[in-house]
Image (cartoon, grey):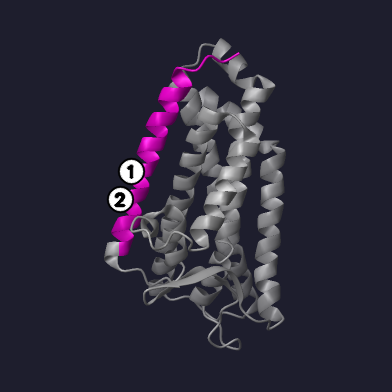
Amino acid sequence: MYNLLKFELYKLKYNTVFKISTIITLFLTFLVLKLFYSHLDIIVIFSFIHGHETFGFFINKFHNIFTPTALEFFKSSFGFSVILIILSLFLVGSYIINEYSYGTVKNTLSYGHSRSKIYLSKIIIIYLSIFILLILLLFLPLAAALILGWVKSISAYTAVKIFKYTLLTYLILITLASAYTCLATIIKSKSIIIALGMILLFVNAGGFLINLKFDIYTPIIMLMKLGSLNSSPSDICNVISICTIIILVSLGLGIITFKNQDIK
């Protein structure tokens, strides 16, 4: 397993899709700062109202532009987390489907590695990639705001809250990545996976299925709801339990599928 992870890390270092994803994420962090500095209006990426709650991804939403808080910068950066959902689709396509196309999977199997360990090593690298992108997106703008003096300080309470919501956001993103990886292993078509992922994102985040009882428990809707940073304990428990179940089911199904595939 160690050698597999070492090999996957080496490939990650030179992976074009990951490099492009990093550049896009860095651009988004710059955009968060630029929007604030320019005193521009709020940018909304997907938004709808259900009951008494507003779901959506909001960027540059500051109560007072002259006295911004650390949480407001964090929330502004969080608004671009929807872009990480899209990037994760391309990362899965690169790490999983391209490996089939280039014959890398077959070559790795020829060295005697077990299929379950190969699958797990790839999913771990995908998780690591998403973690790096998420940390860049959420913390670079905040760090810059502190250095530039836009944000004066961060209290211990605020730091704990930011840490908590970062972990919850990461859990939701790797849940989606786990599901995408499982589907990619079954379908083995990059175009179909990306198309399905984009359709799911637009239908789900657009609120077209919100009247269905299960929709508010889907990862994308839970991520949109998380952006308020005011989730109740029951909401947080739902995120943890539902995401854990989806990850375990996706991993199990993905490993079983990979074990029984005829790889040529």
173 vs 216, left or right, is: right
**Frontmost residue, 263 versus 200:** 200
Q: Name the residue under label 2.
A: 241
**Residue drawn at (52%, 50%) of the image:** 200
Residue 160 coordinates in the image, percent (x, y) = 39, 67
**Residue drawn at (62%, 32%) of the image:** 189
Q: Principal SS element in the magenta part? A: helix
74 vs 221, left or right, is: right
**Residue drawn at (53%, 24%) of the image:** 4
Mark 1 is on which residue type? Ile
**Frontmost residue, 140 versus 219:** 219
Above or below residue 181? Residue 20 is below
Task: Inspect the magenta stretch and tell me whether residue 207 lies in it.
Answer: no
Q: Crowding near pointer 2: few (<14 within 10 Å), some, many (20+)?
A: few
What span is colored magenta in the figure? 235-264
Residue 31 coordinates in the image, percent (x, y) = 69, 68
- Callout 1: SS: helix
Q: Name the residue under label 1.
A: 245
Which quadrant does the C terminus fall into?
Answer: top right
Mark 2 is on which residue type? Ser
- Callout 2: SS: helix
**Residue drawn at (37%, 58%) of the image:** 212
Label 2 near label 1: C-beta < 8 Å?
yes
Residue 135 coordinates in the image, percent (x, y) = 55, 56
